[in-house]
Amino acid sequence: MSNYYITTPIYYVNSDPHIGTAYTTVLADTMARYHRFLGKSTYFVTGTDEHGDKIVRSAAAKGIAPQAFVDEISSRFRVLWPTLHAAPDRFIRTTEAEHVQLVQTILQRVYDRGDIYFGEYGGHYCTGCERFLTEKEMMDGKCPDHGTVPEYIKEQNYFFRMSRYQQWLLDHIAEHPDFIRPERYRNEVLGFLREPLEDLCISRPKSRLEWGIEIPFDKNFVTYVWFDALLNYLTAIGYDHDPNWPAYWNQAEHLIGKDILKPHAIYWPIMLKAAGIDPYQHLTVHGYWNFKDAKISKSSGKPVDVAPLVRYFGADAIRYFLIRDMVVGLDARFTPDALVQRINSDLANDLGNLFSRIAKLVADYFDGKMPKGPSSPCDLALQAEQLVAALPAFINEFRLHTLIEETLQLVRATNRYFESSAPWALAKTDIQRCGEVLYNCAEALRIAAVILHPVMPAKMSELLSRLGEPIEQFHIANSVAWGRLRSGTALQSGTPLFPRIDEKQLPEAFPELFGSTPGPTKAPSTPVTTDLIDIQDFSKIQLRVARIVQAEKLAGSDKLLKLQIEIGSEKRQIIAGIAQHYQPEEIVGRLIIVVANLKPAKLRGEMSEGMLLAAKSDGKLVLLSVESDIATGATIS
Ligand code: ME8
């Protein structure tokens, strides 16, 4: 039997879990379940990262000792995951004795091999990222991810000779095209590696930070958080003492968000190489969940708390939404409307309703027992077979959003077949044919439920039990073959599987999420239609997607911002009247829409080469953007 080892980042305990950290955990859990489903022996690990400066600061702010603080927050993560039906095989904490010992063993080994030396370094340290940023990475002197000014630190420390392994890493990436995926992140890493790699500072003097793992060869220092944290991936599988560790390590897949690409794609493989351990197999990188156009995170002040969402909508509905609405690699928007739409349309309407309709007719005309199927399968069987054949590729390539969509296409086709076959009418004219139609529908639904089980384990188990085919141990090959559904077993109709969400109640239940989203409070005062134009007039305007790479206030104006933008390979400056609505630091990095063929004009002595688009209503202004990530320079039609 082959193996599969999947990990999430171990999360910092300076903040509570939120929808961003929940996403990575749910995705890893779903992948673990799919690989089990493909017949592999699977190990799924998540946990918490508990050392470092920011933990000490958060504990101090609460007035408690670091250990008490980390114990409390770590347990919030540990107890939350099962409520989301995430079932890690191991929950690891970096304060565990087993981990501390492993970090010290590896540090000593790398030191003995001559790859750690003592020296002095001065640099810009971002506590949010827990690493030094290069001049190139900073934007306007700030960390682009955290919007804070890094602290300049100069001191004597231990350094890890990363530079020695730069060429090795480049060769490894070239020889293993799917080492880092999707490709855009592989390219980003190759971009970093075009510059000479600086050696990595891997210690902190105890005089400045005590809350860390002591360096085994110098008691005055503790190790740097990343050197400590990354090694959790080895502790978790019992590196060097559990006989099974190599079999899992050979198939290791790290799942991370794009914020921690550099430590995972550069520091980690080099650390492994220096310690004489083979690199992991895959690093899979996903984008950000944004809410109201900002990354969901504790530091941005926009965390979306998971527990109340789970209580209200149910764990499986949240899992379904998260996995369906994010394409791995791209950013996605968490909008309350999209969440409700998915639940009401896909789950309540397409999936839940299909079961209710089948169960009702089976109860009315077949005494609640599954009727006999036809002697030859229908078209739905072919569609199901094609879907099943594509599953391994969807799973191995992390295309779970497509897997879900294709499965829902099968469910929708089954609903159409139900409608066009009209079994309620057949019941009065041809009861055998009526039974065959119901059998076909129930069988297509059963296969869809097996396929969706890893995404919604509790709800799909319930559906399968109600169909009379409870799940025990299953494997794709023998559970999704058409015709396995037995006749004569009892169907349990019961309450709707996915109750519809009443949108009217939501603003009251979640004021912070739903309160201000249903659109403008008042209708815009400008009439919608003025003079009509021909399509040719419109086609004269060239609209393009651009990215804001720099933004600052225009001296002497309280309304204008000076923006440097990138449109494909072109760089331009535009002056925009948005200073009363946006702070420069909050829009850097955003994708916007610009009119690209406007004649340049001078505004307050500065050239403006284009105009950005924004929507206005009653004194409010919001920038226009695109729904998901796309290359700058993309045309808009
Ligand atoms: O970086 N959208 O921990 P962390 C999607 N301790 N995913 C998000 C997200 C968002 N808005 N916000 C957070 C650390 N995440 C280190 C990791 S690993 C050896 C050490 C998820 O608590 C995503 O997986 O800041 C991201 O990479 C991770 O949380 C960062 O978690």
Image (cartoon, grey):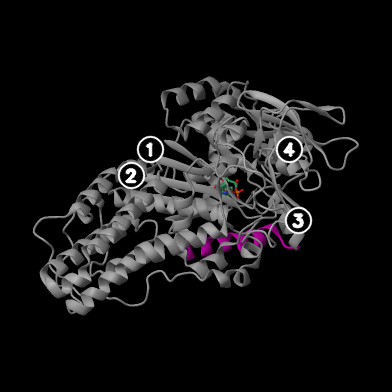
In this view, the mark in front (3 or 1): 3
Residue type at numbered disc 4: Tyr
Of the residues under marks 1 and 4, which one precedes in the sequence? 4
Q: How far apart are labels 1 and 4 at the CA level?
A: 34 Å
The secondary structure that dominates the magenta segment is: helix
Specify few, some or many for label 3: CA neighbours under 10 Å numbering under 14, 14-19, or 20 or more.
Answer: few
Q: How far apart are labels 2 and 3 at the CA level?
A: 59 Å
Q: What residue is pinned by disc 2? A: 3
Residue type at numbered disc 1: Asn
Specify few, some or many for label 2: CA neighbours under 10 Å numbering under 14, 14-19, or 20 or more.
Answer: some
Q: Residue at x 47, y 30 (%)?
A: 276
The picture quadrant where one finds residue 371 is bottom left
Of the residues under marks 2 and 3, which one precedes in the sequence? 2
Q: What residue is pinned by disc 3? A: 618
Q: What residue is pinned by disc 1? A: 250
- On screen, residue 165 versus residue 144, left or right, reads left
- On screen, residue 371 versus residue 63, left or right, reads left
Q: Which mark is residue 125?
A: 4
The secondary structure type at the circle numbered 1 is loop
Q: Is mark 3 within 8 Å of ligand 1?
A: no
Do tag 1 and tag 2 residues touch (Cβ < 8 Å)?
A: yes
Of the residues under marks 1 and 2, which one precedes in the sequence? 2
Q: How far apart are labels 3 and 1 at the CA level?
A: 59 Å
Residue type at numbered disc 2: Asn
Q: Can you say whether 244 is above or below 423 in the image?
A: above
Q: Can you say whether 463 is above or below 636 in the image?
A: below
Q: How far apart are labels 4 and 3 at the CA level?
A: 42 Å
Evaluate whether residue 440 shows in this view.
Answer: yes
Q: Is mark 4 within 8 Å of ligand 1?
A: no
Give the residues in magenta: 63-84
Q: Residue at x 50, y 33 (%)?
A: 272
